[in-house]
Each structure stands twice: as C-alpha cells, then as structure tokens.
Amino acid sequence: MSDDLFQTAFGEFHLQPLHHHPRSPLQAWNAADDLLLQELANRGYATDTHPRTLLVNDGAGALGIALHNAQPQSWNDSFSAHLALQKNLQRNALPEDCVHFIPAHQSPDAIYDCVLIQLPKTLSLLEHQLTQLRNHVHENTLIIGGGMVKHMAKSMIELFEKIIGPTHTSLAEKKARLVFAQFNPALPATAPAPVHYAIPGSPLQLVNLANVFSRQQLDIGTRFLLEQLPDLKGARSILDLGCGNGALGIYAGWKNPQATLHFTDDSFLAVQSARESLALNRLENPAHFHCGDGLEQFDGKVDAILCNPPFHEGNKVHTEIAARMFRDAARHLNPEGTFYVVANRHLDYLPQLRTRFHHCQLIASNAKFVILGASKPGSG
C-alpha cells in the first residue's frame, strides 16, 4: 500500500503534507480523521445529498477531500493548510472550488448541518472557534470533535460543555477519540476579548488574538532580541518574519520611523493581531501585511529581517520551519542587509545559517537564548 493512500468509507485518495519528504514524520491525516469519517459513514452521512458541512482545522485537507462531493467549507488558521488542501485537490484531480476555504480571522457564512472539528493545539483557538460556531449551527447540527488522546486535555471537553452544550466522548481507538456535543441555544456565550500587553521599556501595546504565540505576555526570546536590537537607522524596509502579534516589527518601526514595515505569518489570526497592534500604536510607518508559507508568497527584497522562528509544527518538535525561514530570508534580503534571529541556545542554528549566508556571527547570548546576525546572502 502506498504511504500516501488515504482509505476512507468515502473513497481512496492520495494525500501528502505540504512540505513532504521521505524523512519527515508528518502525514497528511491522522487516526482522528479516520474516526471522524467512519463515524459519519456509520450515521449514514451521504455526500451526494449536500448536507451543509463545516470542517474546522483540517490540517492538509484530508476531511475536505474525502467529503468533497458535499461541497464542504474549511475554516482554518493556517495558510499552509490552505496550500496543502489545494495541492491535494490537484493531486486527486478534483476541482479547486469543491472545498471552500475560510481563513480564521473571518467568520463562517452559513448555518451548518454537520461540523467536524480537529481539536487544535491551543485552548484559545478552540474557545474562539466554538464561540463563533454558536451563530452557525442549529439544535440538530451534528457537532463532532476529534483528536489524538495524548493531546486531548480535559479543559477542551469542558469548553465544549461550557460553550456548545451537553458533551460526551467516545472510547479511544487507534490512540484517538471523538467528542460529541449537542448545541444548547440557551447557554450564555461571550466571545473572548483580545489580550493586550505592553512591550517593556516602550509606550507600545500589543494585541493578541486567539492562537497567537505568547498569548499573555511578551515572549522572553523576543524581549531579549528587542533589548539587543542593533541600530537599523539605515534600513528603508524591515520585515518581521513569523510576526505573531508584530512585536519585533512594531518596535523596530517605532525606533525607525523612516522604514517601511512588512509583517508575515502562516497564521491569519497572527497577521490580524499585527495589523491591530500597529493601528493601536498609531505608528506612521508604511506597512504591509502578508499571510503566507514563510516568504513563498512575498515579492521583493528588504534591508532587515527580524525573526524568532518556531521549532514546533502542530504538536511535533523539529527545526524544518526555521530552515525554510532561513532559506527564504536569504532570497529576500538585500545584498547589504542583515537577518537577525533569536533562538534557544540548544538549537545550534549557526551551521544552517552558514549554508545560506557568507557572514554569520553571534551578536549576544544569555543563559537561554542567542541572537545571531547573518548577512551577504548566497551560498556560504
């Protein structure tokens, strides 16, 4: 059997994660996808009747492609998930419009008969999604969540109870479990307010929407980079790569009002947070906001790039995202520009940077973090 063959009650499909390579531990589906689709089949769900179906957090399009005949909508906070869905539709010779994608900073636009939710990594995103869903379901809507047991916290089940209504779970199967919720329209439900906090040593305030990195306070790695930030007065353009709520770019813009700012992130809610943070601080820098897979969708070159790269993808730990960011930075940095990276000491990013830049150096360090500078992009 092919490693990319996804066998379901609704057909067989060839699926791959977005950045597929033979050594990657990532797969385009998991056991929770299997359980969700099998549950639908057991209930007599028929795609040819076109039940109004919403798929939430469908990582690489496994659910959407399996249910494509129902013309489902897919609501997700990841631009990469959108790309993976498009590529897997093409891989299976399916029309691009048979699954309609909705970015997470927008609300779904229908009342649904069936909602399938792959449980997200963060409680804040689940709370945001469940609260929004109350306006898009009815009392007979089939609402089923799915997740791997080791990542399914009791607090997630409690959120279903609190926001949606009576909830119970299935027995574990293949290390996954389902969550069944019955909508109770009488429950009070208030959308969670965005979190606001300050950048120490400045008058700047940041807005953090659901699912955005470092939800309650400024990340200590980001704070260390801001404390050690080199003089960027010669920079006409500054890019915050993997911007989150925009802390690095907004601080750099405050210090350098002459610079045009660019903010980019895979998360739609992160880019929206950066947009709202910039507006809140009334900075006059020209600014552009991009949601994309690294800098693959970014056009142009800049004088300085600031980055606090993640080393998780979903619930898995690895540094491939950072490696792609380093590659992208080398492509989009002006010849005399500099790429600044803050990272945990144990990750040892200098060898990776040296494959992309001629000049790399340690700028500062403390007990937990290092700040690296890379310039003169090209093969090192």
Image (cartoon, rainbow, N blue to C red):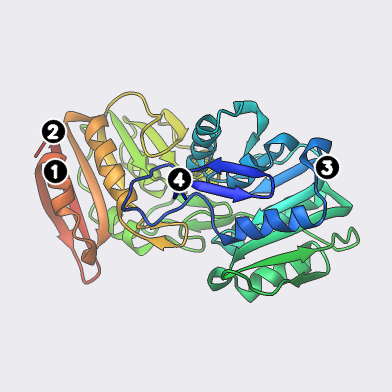
Indicate the secondary structure of the residue bearing disc 3: loop
Q: Which of marks 1 and 4 is nearer the N terminus?
A: 4
Q: Earlier in the sequence, mark 2 or mark 3?
A: 3
Which x, y percent locates residue 72?
71, 38
Q: Which of marks 3 and 1 is nearer the N terminus?
A: 3
Indicate the secondary structure of the residue bearing disc 2: loop
Indicate the secondary structure of the residue bearing disc 1: loop
Q: Nearer the viewer, mark 4 or mark 2?
A: 4
Marking on residue 111: 3
Q: In the image shown, does 178 or 34 lie closer to the viewer?
A: 34
Residue, disc 1: 355
**In the rendered image, the vertical position of residue 95 relative to residue 189, given as above or below:** above
The residue located at (69%, 65%) in the rendering is 178
Q: How far apart are marks 2 and 1 (CA)?
A: 8 Å
Q: Distance between the residues labelled 3 and 1?
A: 51 Å
Whether label 1 touches label 4, CB < 8 Å: no
Q: Distance between the residues labelled 1 and 4?
A: 25 Å
Q: Which of marks 4 and 3 is in front?
A: 4
Residue, disc 4: 17
The residue located at (75%, 37%) in the rendering is 70
Q: Distance between the residues labelled 4 and 2?
A: 28 Å
Q: In this view, does 83 lie to the left or right of 163?
A: left
Does residue 235 show up? no
Indicate the secondary structure of the residue bearing disc 4: loop
